[in-house]
């Protein structure tokens, strides 16, 4: 899995035979700065995009293959013993309104370099069926985390925040809430010479600017009804610059951005899953102590914890989900949740590059 944050790739090895499914090994490999910059640049218009996209897709796939092979070597597992790789690729465009979403990855190269059957391009089929192609993790969240007694909500704090509502009655709702790490990382990179605000320490040193927070929250996306999904097209540096953040102390802007994520997540829960009693965080943002504290303050009376308590480390949930989606694809089972994506119906997701 490599998400919108563009931090790198998370790889997991999962054994689906036992119950609950067993996480055998995991490995994370950060993107080299140059690859990160090239992938980020492809989120915008530019010269020779087709050529650059193909080259970056190749470079990413070599990186994914390296991460996979390093993990297998340290786990002492032979590639022949692995049924499949599920690879999300790197999103550079997400325009379901125009009928497409683009994840850069060269599935043929990944299969060639690893010798393992590779499943990728999970989102296009859902879009072809009229859906948003996102979020795709709800089906996995339901399969792995649903309880028959407790009303749970899974909140993923990646580049974008998304939630999956899992009431005990078996229904599922899932949608993208809005920006999480995309804006926090971008502002940190400008003002702190760091890739991200570790533990949210910098945000914690600032004070929330209430009028700025109110202006952020006026963004129409937050009030739009699901199904909905978003990405860097909408929430990017240009979006933040519209509010002239340079008028303020940088640490206060960071605090306000963190508060925006907490407020929009809490609002989404209040509006769409008011009966939930347990909120389980996952994604890199679950390690952001300041952000978690802000969320806890806005969600009184509910248990706030992370997916680690259910046996899946928060940072690995999305990678686990794409391993599961590959398994579903190869079994010919649907991987989307039409209620979450808006697709006309359940669809088998993914393009398969055989071993
Ligand atoms: N210790 C930490 N403190 C604060 N933020 C963190 C920490 N660890 C990870 N993150 C954040 O998580 C992001 C990566 O999260 P991830 O779930 O991989 O998102 P994505 O799926 O968009 O790649 C990083 O860019 C960073 O913003
Ligand atoms: Mg990531």
Image (cartoon, helix red, strand yellow):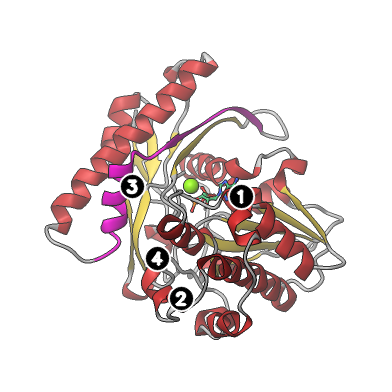
Residue 176 in view? no
The residues colored magenta run 22-44
Query: Which comes sooner in the sequence, label 1 or label 4?
Result: 1
Disc 4 crowd, CA 10 A, few/some/many (<14, 14-19, 20+):
many
Q: Which circle, 1 or 2, is nearer the viewer?
A: 2
Q: Of tags 1 and 3, which is closer to the observer? A: 3
Write down the residue under mark 4. Answer: 232
User: CA separation, marks 1 and 4?
Assistant: 24 Å
Residue 43 within the magenta-colored segment of the rendering = yes
Q: Residues within 10 Å of mark 1 (few under 14, many from 20)?
A: many
Residue 239 x/y as whole percent? 41, 75
Q: In the figure, 349 relative to 118: above or below?
A: below
In the rendered image of this protein, does residue 354 appear above or below residue 276?
A: above
Image quadrant assignment for residue 126 = bottom left
Name the one closer to the observer, 212 or 338.
Answer: 212
Q: Secondary structure at mark 4?
A: loop
* First in sequence: mark 2 vs mark 3: 3
On the image, numbered disc 3 is attached to which residue?
A: 36
As measured in the structure, the alpha-carbon distance from the residue carrying label 2 to the one carrying label 4 is 18 Å
Secondary structure beneath label 3 = helix
**Which circle, 4 or 3, is nearer the viewer?**
3
Kindly check if marks 2 and 3 are in contact, taking CB atoms under 8 A apart as contact: no
Residue 156 in which image quadrant: bottom right
Q: For residue 309: magenta?
A: no
Whether pointer 2 and pointer 4 mark residues with C-beta atoms closer than 8 Å, the reply is no
Q: Which mark is residue 140?
A: 1
């Amino acid at each position: 899995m490599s998400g919108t944050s563009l931090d790198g790739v998370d790889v997991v090895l999962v054994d689906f035979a036992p119950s609950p499914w067993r996480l055998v090994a995991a490995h994370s490999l950060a993107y080299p700065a140059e690859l990160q910059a090239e992938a980020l640049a492809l989120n915008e218009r530019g010269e020779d995009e087709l050529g650059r996209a193909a080259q970056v897709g190749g470079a990413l796939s070599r990186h994914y293959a390296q991460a996979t092979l390093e993990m297998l070597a340290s786990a002492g597992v032979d590639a022949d013993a692995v049924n499949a790789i599920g690879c999300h690729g790197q999103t550079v465009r997400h325009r379901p309104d125009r009928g497409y979403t683009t994840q850069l990855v060269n599935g043929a190269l990944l299969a060639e370099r690893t010798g393992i059957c590779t499943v990728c391009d999970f989102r296009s089929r859902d879009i072809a069926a009229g859906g948003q192609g996102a979020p795709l993790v709800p089906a996995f969240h339901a399969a792995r985390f649903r309880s028959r007694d407790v009303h749970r909500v899974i909140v993923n704090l990646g580049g974008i925040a998304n939630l999956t509502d899992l009431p005990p009655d078996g229904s599922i709702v899932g949608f993208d809430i809005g920006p999480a790490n995309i804006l926090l990382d971008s502002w940190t990179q400008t003002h702190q010479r760091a890739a991200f605000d570790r533990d949210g320490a910098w945000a914690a040193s600032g004070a929330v600017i209430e009028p700025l927070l109110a202006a952020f929250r006026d963004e129409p996306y937050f009030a739009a009804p699901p199904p909905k999904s978003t990405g860097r097209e909408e929430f990017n540096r240009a979006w933040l610059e519209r509010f002239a953040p340079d008028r303020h102390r940088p640490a206060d802007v960071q605090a306000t951005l963190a508060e925006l994520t907490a407020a929009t997540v809490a609002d989404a829960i209040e509006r769409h899953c008011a009966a939930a009693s347990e909120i389980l965080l996952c994604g890199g943002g679950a390690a952001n102590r300041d952000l978690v504290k802000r969320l806890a303050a806005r969600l009184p009376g509910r248990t706030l914890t992370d997916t680690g308590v259910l046996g899946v480390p928060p940072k690995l949930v999305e990678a686990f989900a794409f391993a599961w989606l590959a398994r579903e694809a190869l079994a010919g089972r649907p991987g989307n949740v039409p209620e979450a994506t808006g697709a006309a119906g359940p669809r088998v997701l993914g393009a398969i590059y055989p071993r």
